[in-house]
Amino acid sequence: MVLSLTSQGIQRRRMLDLGLTQGTVVEALHKSPGGDPIAYFIRGAVIALRDEDARKVLVEDQAGLQ
């Protein structure tokens, strides 16, 4: 579950437009053969995020750990 975003400006707006808002459930699906980007299931859509961008999304896992 998304806790917050650390990105700013246009990158933050893009993340919000993708549905990465507080409380959104995110599921990692697949890594590309090189490991970057990774496909995530977000609000019914599969979205690929590069590691650099994904690091700016603070999440809490189902066990309550960050």
Image: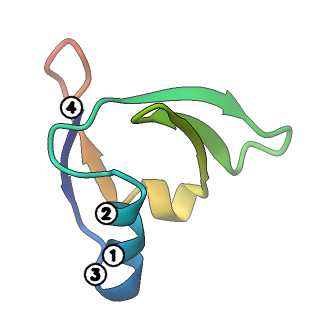
What SS does tag 3 mark?
loop
User: With respect to residue 27, does 63 lie above or below?
Assistant: above
The kind of residue tagged 1 is: Arg
User: With respect to residue 6, does 1 lie above or below?
Assistant: above
What SS does tag 2 mark?
helix
Q: Quadrant of the C terminus?
A: top left
In this view, the residue farthest toward the right is: 33
Q: CA distance from mark 1 to mark 3?
A: 8 Å
In this view, the residue farthest toward the top is: 63
Left or right: where does residue 66 sit relative to residue 45? left
What residue is shown at x 34% (from left), y 51% (from top)?
Answer: 19
The kind of residue tagged 2 is: Leu
Do callouts 2 and 1 mark residues in contact (Cβ within 8 Å)? yes
What SS does tag 1 mark?
helix
x and y percentages locating residue 56 in the rendered image: 35, 61
The mark lying in front, picked from 1 and 3, is 1
- Front residue of 55 and 12: 12
In this view, the residue farthest toward the bottom is: 9
CA neighbours of label 1 inside 10 A, class few (<14), some (14 to 19), many (20+): few
Q: Answer with mark 3 or mark 4, whichever residue precedes in sequence.
A: 3
Name the residue that disc number 4 marks: 60
Q: Answer with mark 3 or mark 2, whichever residue precedes in sequence.
A: 3
Q: CA distance from mark 3 to mark 2?
A: 11 Å
What residue is shown at x 33% (from left), y 75% (from top)?
Answer: 13
Q: Point out which mark residue 13 bears.
A: 1
Q: CA distance from mark 2 to mark 1?
A: 5 Å
Q: CA distance from mark 3 to mark 4?
A: 20 Å
CA neighbours of label 2 inside 10 A, class few (<14), some (14 to 19), many (20+): few
User: With respect to residue 16, does 4 lie above or below?
Assistant: above
Q: Point out which mark residue 8 bears.
A: 3
